[in-house]
């Protein structure tokens, strides 16, 4: 009887542990709008990995902050790596706090310029085979500063992104799009 109770307790503790890990590391996200079409369609559901960009503010660590290397500026250290070019990130909009998904185009130190819908990264034309509909927008040079990134939707003519509300503060990032799970015919890892 003792062995049975112990096994039940171990199973419950393990189940609780798995539940908590999933609650803190994976979030659900529903794609709204067509700003990322054709890669993502309205109504699709995704799992977002919220651990991959886990970060902490090294400025709050005082003298202990000297032991950590910062990424994307002077403020944050990312445990598992910082966002990089082409990553599909889910974040809180800096305008209305809605969750959005966009592609990372620029990182701190980069200069972004848009001419007739073509994106130039540090003076070089960016190859963007994933872009569905380009607009004819011109956009003066923007310097991406520390602790910011520049994001754009893949369907440029219907995307509300960094062109309109500016650079995205790193602290707004929720996580990286990881897995499509609904509808089932779109099931698969996000590329």
Image (spheres, rainbow, N blue to C red):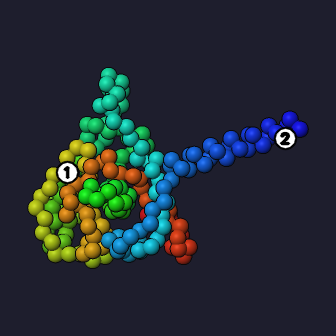
Which circle marks residue 4 in the picture? Answer: 2
Residue 39 pos. (x, y %): 40, 71
Location of residue 15 in the rendering, given as x and y in whole percent from the top left corner:
67, 47
Rounded to the nearest whole Å, what is the CA distance between mark 2 and mark 1? 59 Å
Q: Nearer the viewer, mark 2 or mark 1?
A: 2
Secondary structure type for disc 1: loop
Task: Decide if residue 98 is on the left or right side of residue 136.
Answer: right
Query: Is 18 above or below relative to 97?
Result: above
Q: At 41% across and 68% down in the image, what residue appears?
A: 31
Residue that label 1 marks: 144
**Residue 63 position by quadrant:** top left
**Which residue occupies the extreme front position in the image?**
96
Does dot 2 land on a helix, a strand or a loop?
helix
Residue found at x 43% / y 59%: 177
Using residue 36 as the reference point, say whether residue 169 is left or right of it: left
Quadrant where the C terminus sits is bottom left
Q: Is residue 26 left or right of residue 152?
A: right
């Amino acid at each position: 009887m003792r062995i049975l109770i112990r096994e039940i307790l171990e199973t419950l503790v393990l189940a609780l542990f798995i539940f908590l890990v999933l609650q803190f590391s994976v979030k659900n996200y529903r794609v709204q709008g067509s700003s990322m079409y054709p890669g993502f369609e309205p109504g699709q559901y995704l799992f977002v990995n919220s651990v991959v960009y886990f970060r902490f503010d090294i400025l709050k660590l005082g003298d202990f902050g000297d032991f950590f290397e910062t990424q994307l500026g002077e403020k944050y250290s990312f445990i598992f790596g910082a966002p990089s070019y082409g990553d599909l990130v889910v974040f809180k909009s800096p305008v209305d706090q809605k969750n959005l998904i966009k592609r990372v185009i620029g990182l701190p130190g980069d200069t972004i310029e848009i001419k007739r819908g073509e994106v130039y990264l540090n003076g070089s034309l960016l190859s963007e085979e994933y872009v569905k509909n380009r607009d004819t927008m011109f956009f003066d040079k923007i310097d991406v500063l520390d602790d910011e990134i520049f994001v754009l939707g893949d369907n440029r003519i219907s995307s509300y992104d960094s062109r309109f509300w500016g650079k995205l503060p790193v602290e707004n990032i929720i996580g990286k799009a990881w897995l499509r799970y609904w509808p089932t015919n779109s099931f698969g890892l996000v590329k």
